[in-house]
Amino acid sequence: MELTERKKKVLRAVVESYISTAEPVGSKALMETAGLNVSSATIRNELADLTEEGYLEQPHTSAGRIPTPKGYRLYVNELMEEQRLSLEETRQINEALHLKMQELDKVINEAGRMVSALTNYPAFALAGNARRITIRRFDLILVDTNSFIAVVMTDTNVVKNKLFRLPAELSEPQLQLLTTLLNTAFVGKTLDQLTPELMRVAEHAAGSSYGLISLVVSFAMEVLDGLEHSSVYTSGTSHILDHPEYQDLDKAQKLMTYLSEEKALTESLAIPALNEEGAKILIGPENVAEELKDTSVVLASYDIGDGMKGVIGVVGPTRMDYAKVAAKLSYVADGLAKLFGQTELPPAKPDKEE
């Protein structure tokens, strides 16, 4: 059932008050801060209706109300105002993004640290491939009669090479034949397709030829596996202790342990987000992982180029200032995309006028 405008104003006031204070919100506090111009009795009735409809809950009989995940979702979808960053915030982000790029993982890690410091929440960041990578080309270069260099190029234009030393002699014509076989059978194959193809080739190739083919294909598999594996960098996990929801150390420890488990974090948050566009907000039960059912996650993805995408996000209590966090993450993601694309960083935006 569609909420009335007054109910929406009350819900918005409750959410924003609870975000600010971490304390249940009562009708008296709303009278003082919400500017609703209605009686305290009317506000109490609206609070009761919102509670009955599942947007608010009352932790104790005599306490005020706090938002439920359903209430936060309506707030995020319809009620919160877009936030603009201050000039100081945009300056800090731009300075961090302008750090000299040495390696991709260093930049991603630094971006995660910056987001954690800006939001006061644990942050995670990674770079990965939004699609499966394939081999585009093989080249074999003869060094001498007992060694050759294998060069592998992927469809993302990554080039890797490896020197192989052999117990037996190898001629240039033999190497050219191997190159032809590799480019005929294994080009365009993903990591999980290479092993079945290698088994098929084994049925037809001579023993010595198959041994060499197996060496090169195994190297190609190492290359693809390395490129498809996404390392997750977490920062500021101890920030979780700054929030009253995690004063219970057992509860805090469980969440901090989960955030340190790279595989779990990748599968539940980062990998699905590689195919998302813009900022995404997951509130409480909307999270797949059981460890995140009482938390909210805000994340944003961005293009790096050459078939790669990045994800950056934060984890915190459902009492999160979604508008501010989403604005900061979106700005960082936009800045990283422009940084990797070597275009201009986004301009600074002043505070929104009251």
Image (cartoon, rainbow, N blue to C red):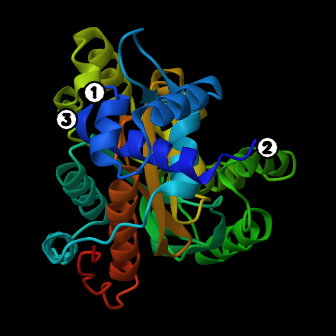
Residue 203 picture location, percent across and down: 86, 45
Instruction: Tell me which numbered mark, 2 or 3, is placed earlier along the sequence.
Output: 2
- The residue at 73%/74% (across/down) is 180
Front disc: 1 or 3: 1
Element class at badge 2? helix
Element class at badge 3? helix
Residue 326, placed above or below residue 339: above
Q: Quadrant of the C terminus?
A: bottom left
**Spatial CA span between label 1 and label 2:** 64 Å
Can you tell which mark lies on residue 23?
A: 1
Between 285 and 147, the residue placed more toward the observer is: 285
Residue 237 picture location, percent across and down: 23, 34
**Spatial CA span between label 1 and label 3:** 19 Å
Q: What residue did someone put label 2 on?
A: 199
- Hey, what amino acid is under mark 1? Glu
Residue 51, placed above or below residue 7: above
In contact (CB < 8 Å): disc 1 and disc 3: no
Q: What residue did someone put label 3 on?
A: 239
- Hey, what amino acid is under mark 2? Met
- The residue at 72%/45% (across/down) is 195
